[in-house]
Each structure stands twice: as C-alpha cells, then as structure tokens.
C-alpha cells in the first residue's frame, strides 16, 4: 500500500511485530558475515602460523623500541637544547644501514634468516640493557647515547634486510602484500602508542625505565622466533661472495624502470616526510608544550600511519596501488604544510597524523611492489638496496632539517619540506615519462 494511503486510513496501523524479529535477526547475521569477510581479508596473512607468531612478537618488541626512541630524542634535546642532537641520534641509527646494508642483504640470502634475526634481536636487547645501566648509574651523556645508537645501527644493517625478506618465507607470495601492510599496522600501532607511553613515563619516572622496558620487550620476539617451524621456507642462495654479488640488488633495480622510479620516489618522500620526527621537540617547545606534547605528536604520526596501514591491508589490491602511491605523496606534502602553520597542540597532532597516514599509504604500497618484483634467490639483496636508499634519505633529510630549524625556525623548514616533497615527486614522474623509450610497434603482416 502506498504511504499516503496508509496514513489516511482510519483503521489501525499494519501489524509488523511478527516480521520484525526475523528481519532483525537476518540483518544481524548478514552484518556479522560481512564483518567476518572484511576481517578475513584484512588479516588473511595471519592464517600462517609462523607469521602469526612474528606479528604478535614484533608488536610487543616495537612498542618497547618506540618508548626508547621517544626517551632518547627527548633526553638528547633536554641535555643540549639543540635540535641537531635528536637528529644526529636518528642519523646514527640509520646511517649504518646505508653503509653496510648490501652486505646484510647478501647474508640474508646466504644464511638461515630466522637464525640471523634471532642473533640481531639478541644484540638489540643487550644494547638496550647497556643504555639502561648507564642511565641508572647516572653517567649517560649525549655522546654515549650517540655511540650506543650507532652500534644499534650496525645491528640494524644486518637485521633489516633479513626481516624484510623473511616476510615472504612466513606468509608466501600470495599473502605477501597483506603481510607487508600488516607489518605496517604493527609498526604504526607501536609508533602510535609507544611515544605516548614514553612521554607519560618520562613525566612519571626517568628515561632509564624506558630503556629497560625496551630491553625486556625483545623477549617476546625471541620467543616467537624460537617457536617457529621453518621447514618449507625458501632455499638459500648459493652464489659466491664478492662485490658483484653484494650489488646484485642494485643491478636488479637499475634494470627495471618502474622499480627504479618507485625507489627514487621513496627516497624523496622519506627525505622530506620522516624529517619531522627530529623537528617535533622544537615544535613542541615553540607551541609552549612539554615532553608529553612531544609524545602526543609522535603518537599522532603513528596513529595516522596505523590508519593507512589498515587501509592498505584491506583495500590494497593491484588496481588500487597506483592510486595509493599518488595519494600518499599528496597527503604527505599537505601534512607537512599544515604542520608548518600549526599554532596549537591539537592542530599539530592532527597534522602529524595526516602526515603519518600519507607516509605509510605510500611506503607500504611501494615496499610490497618491490618485494614481489624480486625472486627468492635475490630478495634479500634487493630489499637491502631499498633499505639502503631509505637509510640514506632519512638521515640526510633529518640532519639537514635539524640544522635548518636551528637557523631559520622549525615552521619555515616544515613548509619547505612540504613543498619540496610534492615538487620532487612531480619532477620524477614527469621526467621518467619524458625519457621513456616507446616500445617498437610490430610491423603489419602483408596481405596475401
């Protein structure tokens, strides 16, 4: 019956109470099925036991890592009052990967990855205990922070290529893009919660407790690695050593224009985007905030990045990858510009979250494409070159931004970074299109 006729009828309204419960139950079941399908797509890599162990072990360990990172950056700034020291500490963590990453990639292709990762994670734990011990003794200086962080960076040069390549062994080729996105989920969940926890711990306790918490957190990932069944994983590479073997990953990337373009875009985005972590202590001070404000802005980056990782894990289909790359670069650029005009802490936290979203939307998509392009025999070396380029771009951008912020002010530097990120991406994309060699057209077959 049409609605106007029903409303005009003098009789009682139609009875719906008998149909409503069944309809409601059907809707509830359909909603639950839809929710279950969505979760099964988002978390499909967790069906692999090895990856499931790694996922939860890394989540605990990375939480501790971000608590320590927050404490180190704040303590270095408090001791010196200069933005360059948090920047130098970040450089000391990342630069060894640029210098030694290719050899780390060769080891990842030649040695059992689980054994290699177990050794590097143990070394990380011992270095965190060393930081805690020095601070508990009251003798920790900024130079000692720099030295311990540099030693941790050497460990990272061996650890990172192995961990990047190990994802394929744990999750398989079919679920690799989802596993890469889920790795970003746990990394950014930790980066969202860890700095906030670290900021509160700095208010309540002292930095040494942050270092101790990080040391203990490595026990989770060591336990996960010990529980894995590694039978059936990819075979180890048998190539001879030498510089040619070490640089095989570089030759692979240079020989594929689309992969080379992605790596160069990643370098530009990392140079500009990740520099903000070293600038946030100065921005917090400029906004009149204390260490908790710095922690909340760091957490904002992580929260936005977590949302992006979740987006990639759920919607990161082949059709969406090009769109995600373009959108990520645009969002990073806009986020940096918004940070530069921040005049209060809530706006700065939201801008940091916006920047973090763009960074991971771009980087998670790019990393999965590069990993899938490599083979089992050289994936460690290819990902080592990827990590080396990123580890060069981040510290160079970080230290340059920190130096510039001390001379010209943090707001101006953030504005320049935002504009430069977008301009570099446009220049690279246009340049590659202009220099692309057209494929020869097949000659028409003559008619008989």
Image: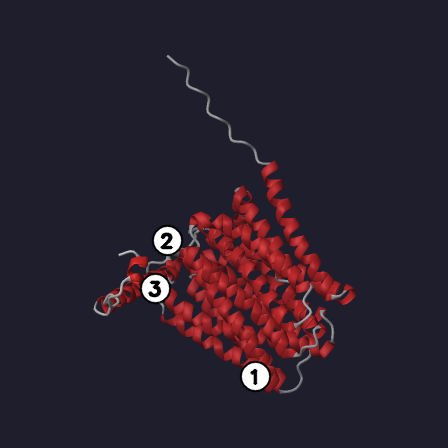
Q: Give the residue at mark 3.
A: 35
Q: CA distance from mark 2 to mark 3?
A: 22 Å
Q: Which residue lies most toward the left here?
A: 18
Going from N to C along the chain, the mark reached first, 3 or 1, is: 3
Farthest front residue?
10
**Nearer-the-camera pick, 71 or 35:** 35
Task: Name the residue carrying label 2.
Answer: 174
Residue at 32% x, 64% y is 31
Label 1: which secondary element? helix
Q: Nearer the viewer, mark 3 or mark 1?
A: 3
Q: Is disc 3 surrounded by few (<14), some (14 to 19) or many (20+) residues within 10 Å? A: few
110 to the left or right of 7: right
Q: Disc 2 or 1, which lies upstream in sequence?
A: 2
Q: Secondary structure at mark 3?
A: helix
In the displayed structure, does residue 335 sit left or right of residue 126?
right
Specify the quadrant that holds the N terminus.
bottom left
| Closer to us: 114 or 429 | 429
- Residue 61 place in picture, x, y as percent: 48, 73
Q: Which mark is residue 209?
A: 1
Residue 2 in sight in this render: yes
Q: Quadrant of residue 65?
A: bottom right
């Amino acid at each position: 019956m049409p609605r106007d006729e029903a409303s005009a009828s003098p009789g009682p309204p139609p009875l719906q109470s008998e149909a409503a419960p069944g309809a409601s139950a059907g809707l509830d079941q359909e909603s639950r099925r839809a929710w279950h399908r969505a979760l099964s797509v988002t978390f499909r890599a967790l069906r692999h036991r090895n990856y499931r162990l790694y996922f939860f072990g890394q989540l605990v360990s990375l939480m501790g890592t971000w608590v320590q990172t927050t404490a180190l950056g704040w303590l270095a700034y408090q001791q010196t009052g200069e933005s360059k020291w948090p920047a130098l500490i970040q450089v000391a963590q990342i630069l060894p990967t640029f210098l030694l990453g290719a050899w780390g990639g060769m080891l990842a292709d030649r040695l059992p990855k689980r054994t290699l990762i177990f050794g590097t994670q143990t070394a990380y734990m011992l270095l965190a205990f060393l930081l805690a011990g020095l601070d508990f003794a009251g003798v920790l200086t900024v130079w000692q922070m720099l030295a311990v962080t540099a030693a941790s960076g050497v460990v990272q040069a061996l650890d990172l290529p192995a961990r990047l390549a190990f994802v394929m062994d744990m999750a398989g080729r079919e679920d690799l893009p989802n596993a890469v996105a889920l790795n970003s989920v746990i990394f950014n969940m930790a980066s969202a919660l860890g700095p906030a926890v670290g900021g509160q711990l700095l208010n309540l306790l002292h930095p040494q407790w942050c270092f101790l918490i990080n040391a203990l957190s490595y026990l989770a990932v060591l336990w996960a690695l010990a529980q894995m069944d590694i039978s059936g994983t990819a075979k180890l590479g048998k190539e001879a050593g030498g510089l040619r073997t070490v640089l095989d990953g570089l030759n692979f990337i240079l020989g594929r224009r689309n992969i080379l373009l992605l790596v160069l875009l990643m370098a530009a985005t990392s140079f500009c985007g990740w520099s903000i972590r070293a600038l946030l202590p100065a921005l917090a001070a400029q906004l009149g905030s204390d260490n908790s404000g710095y922690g909340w802005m760091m957490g904002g980056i992580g929260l936005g990045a977590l949302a992006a990782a979740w987006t990639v894990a759920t919607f990161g289909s082949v059709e969406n990858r090009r769109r995600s790359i373009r959108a990520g670069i645009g969002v990073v650029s806009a986020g940096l510009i918004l940070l530069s005009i921040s005049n209060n802490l809530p706006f700065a936290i939201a801008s940091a979250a916006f920047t973090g979203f763009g960074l991971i939307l771009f980087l998670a998509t790019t990393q999965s494409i590069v990993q899938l392009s490599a083979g089992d025999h050289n994936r460690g070396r290819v990902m080592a070159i990827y990590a080396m380029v990123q580890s060069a771009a981040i510290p160079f951008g970080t230290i340059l931004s920190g130096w510039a912020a001390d001379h010209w002010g943090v707001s101006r530097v953030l504005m320049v970074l935002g504009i430069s990120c977008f301009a570099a991406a446009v220049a690279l994309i246009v340049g590659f299109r202009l220099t692309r060699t057209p494929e020869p057209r097949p000659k028409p077959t003559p008619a008989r």
